[in-house]
Amino acid sequence: MPDARGPRKEDSVTARLWGGRFRGEPDPQIAAFTTSLPFDQRLYRADILGSIAHATMLGRSGIIAPDEAGRIVQGLREILGEVDAGLLKIEGAEDIHTFVESALRTRIGDAARRLHTARSRNDQVATDLRFYLKGEIVKIVGRTLALQQVLLALAEAHSSVIIPGYTHLQRAQPVLLSHHLLAYVWMLHRDVGRFRDAFARTDALPLGAAALAGTSYPIDPQLVADLLGFSSLCENSLDATADRDFAVEFVSAAATLMVHLSRLAGEIVLWATAEFGFVELLDAVAAGSSIMPQKKNPDAAELVRGKAGRVMGDLVTLLSILRGLPLAYNSDLQEDKEAVFDAVDSTNASLQAMGLILHGIRINTEAIAARLRGGFMGATEIADDLARRGMPFRDAHELVGRIVLYAQEQGRELWELTPDEYREFSPLLDASVVEATTPAGAVARKRSHGGTAPERVQEQVQAVRGALTENLSWLASLPAVPVEREAAAPGVQPGGRAPGR
């Protein structure tokens, strides 16, 4: 009877992490279909750092010899440095995990075969993705806070500018431009909160769950968590390897942020038209036409709108992948990464683009002032005055409708009517109504909490500053990742316990 073990296959960067029970090689088309290296290679840093932490733990726990752990860690550090420097090309493997382990074997030989002790690619990839997303959340939060600061500076620089407020894209009531811009600041503030929530639930270590059931080795997952900067451990090994709700939550937060950026971008596109003329973009962030020499197109803002649709699609992709999957790991989960990576790239690029678009945008106050005429936006103030003086609001609403019709037929603004003309409609109206119908008068009256009156807007500004400070403090408070800091250090201390967080 032939030896079922057979000869050991030669080590190479193309080696698989499996194959002992298989005869022959995979079909080339199937191998190409199942490989994830073209996209999961961006996880190389997370994968190598995770392996450094895992190998350190194996050595300190006595699962492998400390000197072998030291050689593994040193080899991994060298690989990381070479990939970072562009000296080692990621290629020729099934996935990033296979590439790293195969590259390690070319450096240190058989000791590399001990690296995968007490883990599976299932908990390994879940760790990689969580570690990667934590870093991306930090970047996105930082860029969102930077965009908030640009909007806040723009609001403060134009604190007295009044613009038409719209409903149904029809002029409705006047508001301060700063009030309008601060609305987006508050949307972005909630987006930051969503990302912080996603960070908290991503910040749990799955390594140690192995394939699905845990491991029989006496591992120390808390040590790995400490080295990688995770604040907690996943509580259930099946859940740790099989779910991607943390990725769904991240992409959901990204999709919501992109919807807000899309709305802001859409208004910039609208405001930059000749019909509105509220803003003019810097030449550096605009584009021309290949046929019409006079054009100045807001291409970047339009692309932000378009990319919002992509990220929304990424969310649907992730939810569709997870729907109906039995426990535990299934290869369907390999498809989660492209959606996550696309959401990361689109969101980061859009945040940067919006910051550049808004930085230096010119506000055309003359065009805005011209649009404050003709909309009869002070009409509600008249109705409110009548209601305060005893007239039922519905009756006041109807009466003011007749006043608007009269002013429209006269070709005059509400504030251009005389007190005598107002009294012809109702004796309850006096001279004070004239000032109330002006844009400045109407704005000054909106003193309710969160309203557009200057003093309320100034309160918002102070509140925004406090919120920004708190979120910046959160970023600054995030602990360093010990294994990342130590990855560039020469040698490894095989004994002792890693420092706590």
Image (tube, helix red, strand yellow):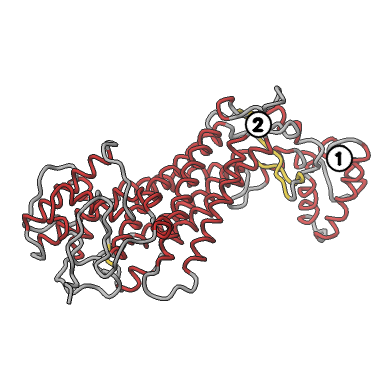
Q: Quadrant of residue 15?
A: bottom left
Image location (x, y in percent) of residue 27: 39, 60
* Residue 442 found in image quarter: top right
Q: Which residue is mark 1?
A: 419
Quarter containing the C terminus: bottom left
Instruction: Please indicate whether residue 379 sits to the left or right of residue 284 in the image.
Output: right
Residue at image coords 76%, 53%: 384
Which quadrant is home to the N terminus?
bottom left
Side of 497 relative to 337 (left or right): left
Between residue 4 and residue 454, name the one nearer to us. 4
What is the secondary structure assignment of the residue under circle 2? loop
Dot 2 crowding, Cα within 10 Å, few <14, some 14–19, many 20+? some
Q: Position of residue 174 (x, y in %)?
A: 71, 42
Q: Earlier in the sequence, mark 1 or mark 2?
A: 2
Residue closer to the observer: 250 or 243? 243
Q: Amino acid at mark 2?
A: Asn
Q: Residue at x 28, y 55 (%)?
A: 98
Amino acid, disc 1: Pro
Of circles 1 and 2, the one toward us is 2
